[in-house]
Image: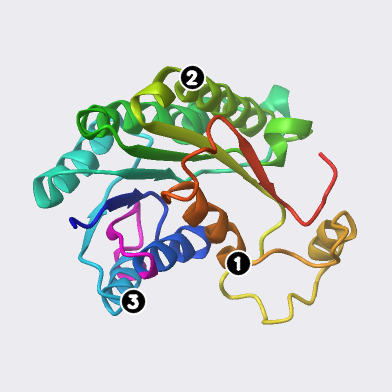
Amino acid sequence: MARKVALITGAGRNIGRACVLGLAEDGFDLVVNGSRDRDACENVAQEAARHGAATLVVMGDIGRADDCKHIAGEALARFGTIDALVNNAAVRPGGAFLEMSEADWQRVMSVDLEASIRLSRLCLPGMLDKGWGRIVNFTGMNAIAGHGGRAAVSVAKHGVWGLTKALAKEFGPKGVTVNAISPGPIAPDDADQKNDPSNAHRRELVAKVPVGRMGQPREVAAAVRLLVSDTGAYINGQMLQVNGGAAT
């Protein structure tokens, strides 16, 4: 059987990296995308290759339309297909609503919302030709509860949730499922193994999580692995919250 191919944005570290390694274990070949740190992306690709995956690193800023075309074009030129798209990359700047510049607002819209639209439009035709495809978007707790001081992120991520529901209804009958994942507080790769909240910000985050700790990137990746699998074929148009029970 031909191996399936997954394109993951923001794949150099944290959740993106965990998704690459998890899908490599599941038999996917991987397109690893990042915007700045090529070394991190190359290292992830090498780790995935040790699981038997064929890999391709394509650098590019998903906030730019031409870069999205380049990323998808390189992936299709190498593998001939993109079976699963994981729209993970995002920017999350803070700032008062009335003080945020137009350029900064548009940057958030471009990366956090419009990139998911662009890449979905680029990947869907091939999925429809095969009658099989998976798109996983990332929203976040901001998309549900709103976040004072991060209005742009809240707006963009809520838009991603609307996009997810609309595409799920339009393309579900054609073999393509579209879902969203909403992570809670997730420890970065360089955090200690026990997730001990060592500063005030982490203590504040953990206080809101009933399981009493921050999540691990691999725990979010586990949800992605389910959603892109054949086993997850009946999950469509859903927002899967991976947040330790935190209220939203």
Start and end of the magenta stretch?
25-40
Local packing at callout 1 (Cα closer than 10 Å; few below 14, some 14-19, many 20+) is some
Identify the mark nearer the N-term, 1 or 3: 3
Residue 82, placed above or below residue 191: above
**Image mark for residue 47:** 3
Distance from disc 3 to disc 2, alpha carbons, whole Å, reads 36 Å
Work out whether 196 lies above or below 121: below
Residue at the spot of label 2: 169
Between 148 and 75, which is closer to the camera in this rendering? Answer: 75
Q: CA distance from mark 1 to mark 3?
A: 18 Å
Q: Going 82% across and 52% down the picture, which residue do you hit?
A: 245
**Residue situated in front as seen by the camera: 16 or 112:** 16
Q: Is residue 125 left or right of residue 106?
A: left
Q: Which residue is mark 1?
A: 188
SS class, disc 1 = loop
- Relative horizontal placement of residue 237, taking residue 183 as reference (left or right): left
User: Hey, what amino acid is under mark 2?
Assistant: Lys
Label 3–label 2 contact, CB within 8 A: no
Residue 215 included in the magenta stretch of the image:
no
Mark 3 falls on what kind of element? helix
- Percent coordinates x, y for residue 58 in the rendering: 23, 53
Q: Can the viewer see residue 34 in this picture? A: yes
Q: Earlier in the sequence, mark 1 or mark 2?
A: 2
Q: Are marks 1 and 3 in contact (CB under 8 Å)?
A: no
How much space separates mark 1 and mark 2, taking CA atoms? Answer: 34 Å
